[in-house]
Image (cartoon, grey):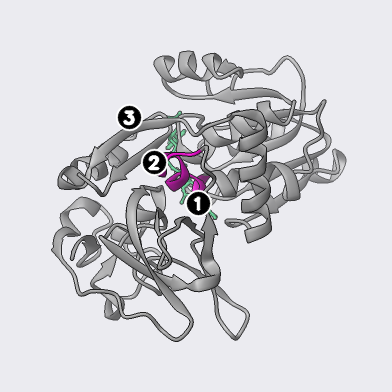
Amino acid sequence: MRAAFATGFDDADPLAVLTIGDAPEPTPLDGWAVVEVRASALNHHDLWSLRGVGLRKEQLPMILGCDAAGIGPDGSDVVVYPVVYTEKGSFSILSEHYQGTIAERVTVPAYNLVPKPAELSFAEAACLPTAWLTAYRMLTTRGRLETDGAVLVQGAGGGVATAAVLIGRALGARVYATSRDAEKREKIAALGATALEPGARLPERVDVVIETVGEATFEHSMKAAKTGGRIVVSGATSGHLPRVDLRRVFALQLEILGTSMGTPDELADLMALMARTGVRPVIDSVVPFSDVRKAFEHLHSGDIFGKVVIDHTA
Ligand SMILES: NC(=O)c1ccc[n+]([C@@H]2O[C@H](COP(=O)([O-])OP(=O)(O)OC[C@H]3O[C@@H](n4cnc5c(N)ncnc54)[C@H](OP(=O)(O)O)[C@@H]3O)[C@@H](O)[C@H]2O)c1
């Protein structure tokens, strides 16, 4: 079957070790199901994998992709929940230990199949399992955002960040969002956020900061949080060793909270929120599988707004 996989690691030029070609059919374990993938979505995670983050050489070749929506073994439309729990209680995301979703077929534990809401297209549903679920958990379970709260989203052009802007608005919060790019700031404003340049002074301090950028924005995130504010971190695209002013942490009783992905219950809650409010993922582009390399190049360029989706039927 055709697939996109990592055949090596290259920190400087990750796309040099991306291979598009033939991969073995998935061999389901006991209790696992095979899904015919209709749409997958790219995440920054796929670039990290090509750089060798979270993968060992002996695991190669590894099919990339955490996210998929498709057809389950009983013919129903499903979304693939991408976290696989081991008996030892640890967890792994598809494409880390088990083969990923950017392929004609993927195998996952049967309990990872979630019915796709009829309101969502395959392309929209494929955006949810990683970026949207992570953003939802950051704002709700971890950030404890209240309806009349305020939130700052850093690096707002990205997949997690555009999700956080829209979910924050759907939850009734005031949303501020920074982006380095003027054109992206215009698009963010159109989503209902107050768009700002990185590091800009906010009209108010916020309850929750959504941090996926890391070093480039962290100092600003610390300054933007109000007393008792929560800075929720799920990524560090620009670097993971920012300077942290500990005096500010204790004086303002700030919370710096780490988070990864989300639970199946949170995915169900997110889908219910979307059905209720009509909120849909921001899709940067839908790229046919035959052009999957172009999709990776586009993500790698950083010139994206929302999710890059792969159409597996084309
Ligand atoms: N822990 C988890 O479960 C989890 C889940 C999902 C994602 N993540 C992590 O979260 C991060 C974002 O993921 P994603 O898939 O949303 O990535 P993405 O779609 O590629 O977006 C990355 C965004 O980060 C901003 N950015 C990048 N470099 C920057 C810099 N030097 N200065 C300021 N902003 C910068 C950009 O925003 P602007 O261009 O608008 O400035 C860019 O759009 C990644 O590191 C990813 O690995 C973690």
Label at residue 123: 2
Magenta stretch encompasses residue 295: no
Label at residue 130: 1
Which badge, 3 or 2, is on the more N-terminal residue? 2
Mark 1 CB lies closer than 8 A to ligand 1: yes
Residue drawn at 55 percent across, 72 percent down:
91
Q: Amino acid at mark 2?
A: Ala
Which badge, 1 or 2, is on the more N-terminal residue? 2
Question: Splitting the image into 4 quarters, where does residue 19 fall?
Answer: bottom left
> Taking 18 as reference, is 314 above or below it?
above
Label at residue 303: 3
Question: Splitting the image into 4 quarters, where does residue 7 fall?
Answer: bottom left
> Taking 226 as reference, is 33 above or below it?
below
Magenta stretch encompasses residue 127: yes
Q: Give the residues drawn in magenta, as a range.
A: 120-131
> Taking 185 as reference, is 213 above or below it?
below
Which badge, 3 or 1, is on the more N-terminal residue? 1
Q: Is residue 86 left or right of residue 168?
A: left
Q: Amino acid at mark 1?
A: Thr
Between 13 and 4, which is closer to the camera in this rendering?
4
Q: In the rendered view of the protein, which quadrant contains the C terminus?
A: top left
